[in-house]
Amino acid sequence: MRLLSYGPVGEERAGFVRDGGIVDLERAMHAAGIRGATADMRLFLDRPDWRGVLDRVAGVREGAAAVPTSGVRIGPPVPLPRKLMIAGANTVSHMREAHPFTNAAPPKQPMVLAKATSALCGPADDIVLPPETAKLDYEVELAVVIGRTARRIRPDQVPDCLAGYAAFNDVSARDVQLAQHEDNAFYRVHFFGKSFDTFAPMGPHLVTTDEIPWGEPLSLRTWINGQIRQDGDTSDLYFGIAELVAACSAVLTLYPGDIIATGSPAGVAYFMTPPAFLRPGDLVECEVGQVGRLANRVRAEGARA
């Protein structure tokens, strides 16, 4: 099933896709006589029986009419998760293009960074370019969403712990991230450089795991104003989904709705010659095969949406 969150920023309601339209999840649960109905996607995933609930509401028609989709904003599938993590330098091709920093040598353990959950935005929302950066960059990634509480799980247990997948754009202010305002490169501030508002477009759907065969390579592509910049797939991941999620669970308890972006292929703006950073008016399209496509316009902060 394809789940989503729709509505104004901060007021998103959980829903699912049926016949090309949106069905409100809470209303469908009420119509099916299911107790504990909620309009919040993270709270829904907190239910231990959420998969069974989806099976029950899938066929409900009476009392669960489709939501009119004209003018409806689609938000990130899980608007405010507990955690939003990203895997840095986790594709072979990106490690190679980043050789001035990596020497093309892979990390011995996953390099996991974090973004503020408030950076999340919808699949068609504007990416707001703040005045603090002149080096706005993109990275298409497959995001995995946790479906049950997990701590110190083995890689072979990971598939049963996932709710599903979504397309994700790990937007970065490279000059802030790499602390180019400092004289000492030790003072890098990855978190600030990746956490400005709107720096995490995601969606349009949370595609549940039953929709996609486990281990099947998924394409990863980015277009800027129609020009392809990134063109790879998830077979390029150095640490695969199972290894990555298991490694995160060794440090942190993972909760339903937590998001882990798994890594981006070569082709980011920073390593182009010359660098081709994003500018106001640019259209950034990121696509994960079988999962979804994002299309976000860059807008200078303070400019009219």
Image: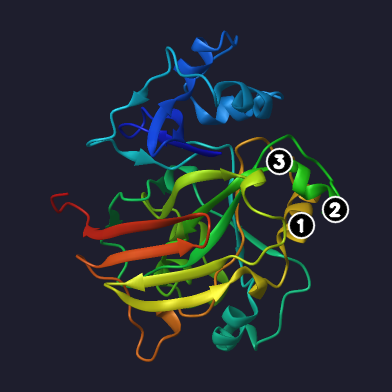
**Labels 1 and 2 touching (C-beta < 8 A):** yes
Q: What is the number of the mark on residue 242? A: 1
Residue corresponding to mark 3: 254
Taking the spot 53% from the left edge, 16% from the top edge, the residue there is 29
Q: Is residue 166 left or right of residue 62?
A: right
Q: Hey, which residue is sitting farthest left in the picture?
A: 304
Looking at the rendered image, the quarter that the N terminus falls into is top right
- Say few, some or many: other residues with alpha carbon within 10 Å of mark 1 (under 14 / 14 to 19 / 20 or more): some
Dot 3, crowdedness within 10 Å: few (<14), some or many (≥20)? many
Q: Residue furthest bottom?
A: 273
Which residue is located at x 31 percent, y 56 percent?
Answer: 127
Secondary structure found at label 3: loop
Can I make out residue 165 in this image?
A: yes
Q: Which residue is mark 2?
A: 156
Which three-letter amino acid code belongs to the residue tagged 1? Ala
Q: Position of residue 204 (x, y in %)?
A: 42, 47
In the rendered structure, are the residues bearing label 3 and label 2 in contact, judged by CB atoms less than 8 Å apart?
no
Label whose residue precedes the other's in the sequence (3 or 2): 2
- The residue closer to the viewer here, 217 or 122, is 217
Q: Nearer the viewer, mark 3 or mark 1?
A: 1
Q: Is residue 265 above or below residue 9?
A: below
Regarding residue 268, the answer to whether it shows in the image is no
Q: Disc 3 residue type?
A: Leu
Q: Earlier in the sequence, mark 1 or mark 2?
A: 2
x%, y% of residue 157?
A: 83, 47
Q: Earlier in the sequence, mark 3 or mark 1?
A: 1
Q: Position of residue 226 (x, y in %)?
A: 29, 73
Disc number placed over residue 126 in the picture, else none: none
Residue 282 is situated, as x and y percent measured from the top left of the image, at 24, 68
